[in-house]
Image (cartoon, helix red, strand yellow):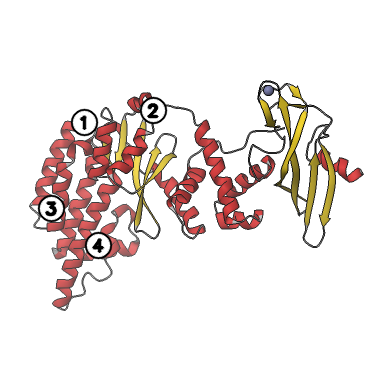
């Protein structure tokens, strides 16, 4: 008898809720508790709160609760239904769980904390002794709650980035709030419609407030932003631009290295990363390497110099001065007789207006970098996602900064 009262108090159940039966399985480390509401006591209607007579009881259901002394603890109850004059026959609210959950609210809170704490679904699943499906269910419910509660806060600066999921073959489009460093939502593919769908889900008034969007020089994304955020400036991400220039330098190195080897020279062997980094990040060895190579009149040396010169563009304050600098740079690049470099220079010229917007907004998708590394961590721990929806839920769960917790029920 004492045990039942103890459990009733541990569960925080108020009268007339009662723990009517306890079964302990010592070998299986499990406790089962049966909770009842006396059939002769009136209960509040879930709609209007008026006390009504009990009509009948539903089928027995189970809820996983917090462990007691390392014993997995499961609650059982046949939820009573009342008959309200105004609202008819209704199941009453139970204080330990939300509507149709398989877990008590306290267990869900714990699961959310464990997941967020270890950023690793495999580990969390082991700690909580949950199946993949159960854990996914908890995440999905939490994200749905969070999205419902998300307030229409001002969105000023957005970032759009593509991510690969499923071993690099399938893409997803990520829409982020750069100011709050959070993911707003994720869509399948990296097509114009992928981003359009994400932008359309932002209410009109909020959309009009957006000042700038950081995005790669990728036509489908550019088209989507122009169609749905016509007032916002597009800012081509400087890290993406640096990547294009780096790839061009590397293409020059590869071709030149091949030609040199043919002539019996190993001059460029092992220099790949020298040309991909900037002097302030060079090791002592790379500095020595550069000294030996710089007077050799190498093509890759010239390509590298042009790449480094481009970075000066970001230091300008005034657009006009920056435009003049770009014009000079573009001339060097296109007259360098280095085809990969000239190609990138032409692309940059085509997009120049949306590159110079950086000087005004100073935004990049670097803010998304923190988010990206979190996603990477979640992704590798989950050993791939079976489908896109699981991937989306995980990203929003871990990177959406949503209010995930179930409501206090007691
Ligand atoms: Zn009622």
Considering every residue shown, the one lying at the far right of the view is 1
Choose mark 3 or mark 4, whichever is in front: 3
Residue 407 is drawn in which quadrant?
Answer: top right
State left or right for residue 67 relative to residue 354: right
SS at badge 2: loop
Residue 140 is drawn in which quadrant?
Answer: top right
Instruction: Report the residue marked by disc 2.
Output: 203
**Distance (Cα) linking label 3 and label 1:** 25 Å
In the rendered image, the vertical position of residue 48 relative to residue 289, given as above or below: above
SS at badge 1: loop
- Of residues 15 and 160, the one drawn nearer to the viewer in this rendering: 15
Residue density around tag 2, few if under 14, some if 14–19, many if 20 or more, within 10 Å? few
- Tell me the quadrant of ligand 1: top right
Mark 2 CB lies closer than 8 A to ligand 1: no
Instruction: Report the residue marked by disc 4.
Output: 290
In the rendered image, the vertical position of residue 297 relative to residue 143, given as above or below: below
Choose mark 2 or mark 3, whichever is in front: 2
Q: Earlier in the sequence, mark 1 or mark 4?
A: 4
Any mark on residue 318, and which? Answer: 1
Considering every residue shown, the one lying at the far bottom of the view is 264
**Distance (Cα) linking label 3 and label 4:** 24 Å
- Of residues 386 and 231, the one drawn nearer to the viewer in this rendering: 386
Any mark on residue 342, and which? Answer: 3
Q: Earlier in the sequence, mark 2 or mark 3?
A: 2
Residue at coordinates 32% horizontally, 40% vertically from top-left? Answer: 195
């Amino acid at each position: 008898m004492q045990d039942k009262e103890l459990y009733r108090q541990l569960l925080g159940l108020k009268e007339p809720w009662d723990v009517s039966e306890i079964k302990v399985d010592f070998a299986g480390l499990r406790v089962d508790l049966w909770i009842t509401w006396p059939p002769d006591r009136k209960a509040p209607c879930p709609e209007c709160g008026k006390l009504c007579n009990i009509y009948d009881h539903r089928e027995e259901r189970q809820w996983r609760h917090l462990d007691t002394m390392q014993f997995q603890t499961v609650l059982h109850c046949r939820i009573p239904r009342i008959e309200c004059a105004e609202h008819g026959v209704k199941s009453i609210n139970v204080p330990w769980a939300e509507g149709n959950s398989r877990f008590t609210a306290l267990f869900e809170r714990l699961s959310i904390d464990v997941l967020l704490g270890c950023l690793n679904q495999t580990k969390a699943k082991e700690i909580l002794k949950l199946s993949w499906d159960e854990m996914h269910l908890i995440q999905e419910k939490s994200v749905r709650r969070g999205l419902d509660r998300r307030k229409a806060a001002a969105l000023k600066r957005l970032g759009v980035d593509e991510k690969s999921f499923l071993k690099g073959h399938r893409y997803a489009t990520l829409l982020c709030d750069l100011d709050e460093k959070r993911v707003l939502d994720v869509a399948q593919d990296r097509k114009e419609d992928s981003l359009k769908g994400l932008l359309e889900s932002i209410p009109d008034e909020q959309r009009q407030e957006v000042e700038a969007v950081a995005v790669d020089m990728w036509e489908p994304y550019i088209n989507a932003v122009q169609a749905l955020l016509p007032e916002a400036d597009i800012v081509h991400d400087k890290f993406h631009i640096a990547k294009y220039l780096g790839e061009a330098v590397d293409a020059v190195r590869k071709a030149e290295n091949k030609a040199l080897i043919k002539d019996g020279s190993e001059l460029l062997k092992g220099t790949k990363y020298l040309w991909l980094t900037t002097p302030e990040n060079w090791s002592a060895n790379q500095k020595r390497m550069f000294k030996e190579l710089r007077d050799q009149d190498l093509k890759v040396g010239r390509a590298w110099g042009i790449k480094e010169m481009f970075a000066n563009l970001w230091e300008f304050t005034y657009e006009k001065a920056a435009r003049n600098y770009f014009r000079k740079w573009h001339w060097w690049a296109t007259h360098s007789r280095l085809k990969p470099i000239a190609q990138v220079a032409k692309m940059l010229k085509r997009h120049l207006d949306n590159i110079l917007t950086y000087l005004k907004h100073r935004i990049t998708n670097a803010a998304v970098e923190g988010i990206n590394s979190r996603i990477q961590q979640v992704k590798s721990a989950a050993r791939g996602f079976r489908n896109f929806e699981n991937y989306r839920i995980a990203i929003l769960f871990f990177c959406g900064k949503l209010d995930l917790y179930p409501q206090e029920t007691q």
